[in-house]
Image (spheres, rainbow, N blue to C red):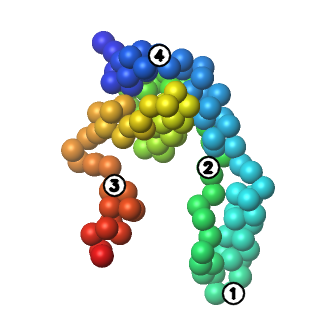
Amino acid sequence: MSSKLETFLSENKIDRRRLIAVSRDLERLRPGDRAIKLKQSQARKSEDGKKPDGLDKPRSGRPITEAGLRRALEGQSVPGPQKTRILRAVNHVLTQKKQDAVGIEALFDVSPLNPPKPKAEAAEGEAS
């Protein structure tokens, strides 16, 4: 039995080794990310302990692993952050192939108890 992810990768001719390499590059911490983490750490240690406003979210520094990708391809349970990293890597490869990006529903069976959160753009459009 093949998973949704495995059939998607075979249909789009995406190699799992390429996904791991792309993820390693996408998730790698850069100097800007380290600066953000430093500011957050310094803010936590300050007297008021508040997070500074206007900081972007740093990269995780954790790429997808061979074991995590294998579990996802076999259809076993995969944590949410790992699914997001796989999705980010797949979308990057699709963009390089000049194809449209996909949603998480195209790669994984999304549990009805835990649906994906709506994008921030959609929330902003409703607020206007």
The answer to which of marks 4 and 1 sits earlier in the sequence is 4
* Left or right for 127, reference 33: left
Q: Tell me whether the residue at label 2 lies in contact with that at label 1, contact meaning CB atoms closer than 8 angstroms.
A: no
* Camera-nearest label, 2 or 1: 2
The answer to which of marks 4 and 3 sits earlier in the sequence is 4
CA gap, disc 2 to disc 1? Answer: 27 Å
Q: Which residue is pictured at 75% across the width and 63% down the height? A: 35
Q: Tell me whether the residue at label 3 lies in contact with that at label 1, contact meaning CB atoms closer than 8 angstroms.
A: no
Return the residue at label 2.
Answer: 60
* Camera-nearest label, 4 or 3: 4
Return the residue at label 4.
Answer: 13
Return the residue at label 3.
Answer: 117
Q: Amino acid at mark 1?
A: Glu
The answer to which of marks 2 and 4 sits earlier in the sequence is 4
Q: Amino acid at mark 3?
A: Lys
Return the residue at label 1.
Answer: 47
Q: Which residue, as the protein is rendered here, is positioned at the far top?
A: 1
Crowding at mark 3 (Cα within 10 Å: few <14, some 14-19, many 20+): few
